[in-house]
Image (spheres, helix red, strand yellow):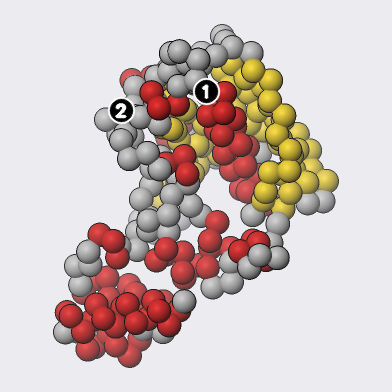
Amino acid sequence: MTRGLGGLFRGVQSLTSLPATRAGLGHPSACVSLRTMVALPSFLSFEPRDFSLPNSSWSSEMLRLYEQYSIQCEVETEGGENRGGQWQRLPSYNRSLKYATGGNYLSKIIQSKARLFTRNIRDPGAGFEYVVFANKEEKRCVCIFQAGHRLEGPPGHVHGGATATMIDTVTGSLAALLSGPVMTANLNINYRSAIPLGSTVLIETSLDSEEGRKKFISCKVTSTDGSKLHTEATALFLSINISHLLQGG
């Protein structure tokens, strides 16, 4: 696979007549040099797109909550130091590949078009619109979630499977933040009241306990003011070696 990627870059270089970059193709820094010297087509871009940023479909309530948590996040100063709150916004794209052998380099190329499957609907607002904020010190995550019309189950309301998907995504994000690569071992969900399509809800998760490779996490889905409980859940995640997983082990 590496030889194939190298051939692709050599082809791009020959088309753009930049022999000065040929010698360094085997080193990751060469990718940066090539990118800064050549205006690559979008399909060759190394930058993954972050789908957890506001777009035109976000409701005023979702934007309000996004701003509320954003101002509590860490910020990076010009000197490269982190300063600010204990929260951090988690980018929404596939990050698993970086844990494989050599994945840190390969992921910069492949992740440019890799997305969590909840982001596979191209139309903004039609499917899963969400952003996750994490507090590693307090071992909890908060997700602001807005469901689009393609997630309909009961008329005018969100399908229970879509809610389960989001619960798995957010509890898994917390487990992965605390211990690296994980897989869902158990997900137990109690549905209390249906979520109206287009509404904004909060998905809050916290770590209950841990035993070796096991992470036990609880979750609740509520209205943004906390007055209505939509769903409760508990989840069990197991730490894994993702290199073995990708190799079929």
Quarter in which the C terminus is drawn: bottom right
Give the Cα distance between marks 2 and 1: 20 Å
Q: Quadrant of residue 35?
A: bottom left
**Which residue in the structure is indicated by mark 1?**
159
Task: Answer with left or right where residue 236 lies relative to residue 221.
Answer: right
Determine the residue positioned at 30% across, 28% down.
Answer: 57
What residue type is disc 2 on? Ser
Determine the residue positioned at 34% across, 29% down.
Answer: 125
Task: Answer with left or right where residue 161 lies relative to residue 4.
Answer: right
Query: Which label number is shown at residue 57?
Result: 2
- Please, what secondary structure does the residue beneath circle 1 have? loop
**Would you call the spot at circle 2 few (<14 residues within 10 Å), some (14-19), or many (20 or more)?**
some
Residue 108 position within the rendered picture, expressed as x and y whole percent measured from the top left: 42, 64
Determine the residue positioned at 78% across, 46% down.
Answer: 214
Residue 216 position within the rendered picture, expressed as x and y whole percent measured from the top left: 75, 38
Residue 180 position within the rendered picture, expressed as x and y whole percent measured from the top left: 64, 54
**Would you call the spot at circle 1 few (<14 residues within 10 Å), some (14-19), or many (20 or more)?**
some
What residue type is disc 1 on? His
Q: Residue furthest top?
A: 227
Determine the residue positioned at 29% across, 65% down.
Answer: 44
> Quick one: 123 or 173, which is closer to the camera?
123
